[in-house]
Image: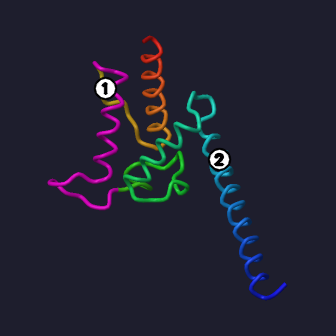
Amino acid sequence: MNTNEESNSKGLSMLGIAKNIKYNNKVIWETRELHFYKGTFVDILDIHIGYSRIANIFNIVVNDIQANFRFGEELDASFISDFRHNELDQIVFDIEEFELILYPNKINKEVSIVKDYIILLAQCRQANFEEYQIL
């Protein structure tokens, strides 16, 4: 085997190891986060949807989010303005939309951590799913 083939085979094996590590980290992350939602009807899809939304809003990596992160503390706004919406404003808008779906006559359920947000999102998904099942 010449040096080109050796370096290519090393590169391919390192790529396989990197993919395996990435997969294992994802499994560890999913397992860790699912543990926080034990006893609720939240599933891994709810967690992926909610965490992806939060990561997009706060411009962070999904795997860096944890269920016990607090909005305004670990997940804080990048700026404060009376003229533009920041990340916390967007979370409040999401929560208000969730609550309108679930509780049309009552608003302002306290949501202060990621876990509360995900549970509310899962309840909305479940409510909409059941609504479509009737049709």
Q: Tell me what residue is drawn at x 31 percent, y 26 percent.
A: 100
On the image, the x and y values in percent for residue 84 come to 19, 54
Q: Which mark is residue 70?
A: none
Amino acid marked by disc 1: Leu
Examine the image and state in which quarter residue 96 appears.
Answer: top left
- How would you rate the neighbour count of disc 1 (Cα within 10 Å): few for under 14, some for 14-19, many for 20 or more? some
On the image, the x and y values in percent for residue 40 come to 58, 29
**Residue denoted by label 2:** 32
Q: Which mark is residue 100?
A: 1
Q: Tell me what residue is drawn at x 53 percent, y 45 percent.
A: 67
Q: Which of 89 and 61 lies nearest the eye of the viewer?
A: 61
Task: In the displayed orientation, state which residue is furthest to the right.
Answer: 1
Tell me the SS state at disc 1. helix
Q: Tell me what residue is drawn at x 47 percent, y 15 percent.
A: 133
Q: Read off the magenta span.
A: 77-105
Q: Is residue 34 above or below residue 54?
A: above
Amino acid marked by disc 2: Arg
On the image, the x and y values in percent for residue 135 come to 42, 12
Q: Tell me what residue is drawn at x 64 percent, y 53 percent.
A: 26
On the image, the x and y values in percent for residue 102 come to 37, 22
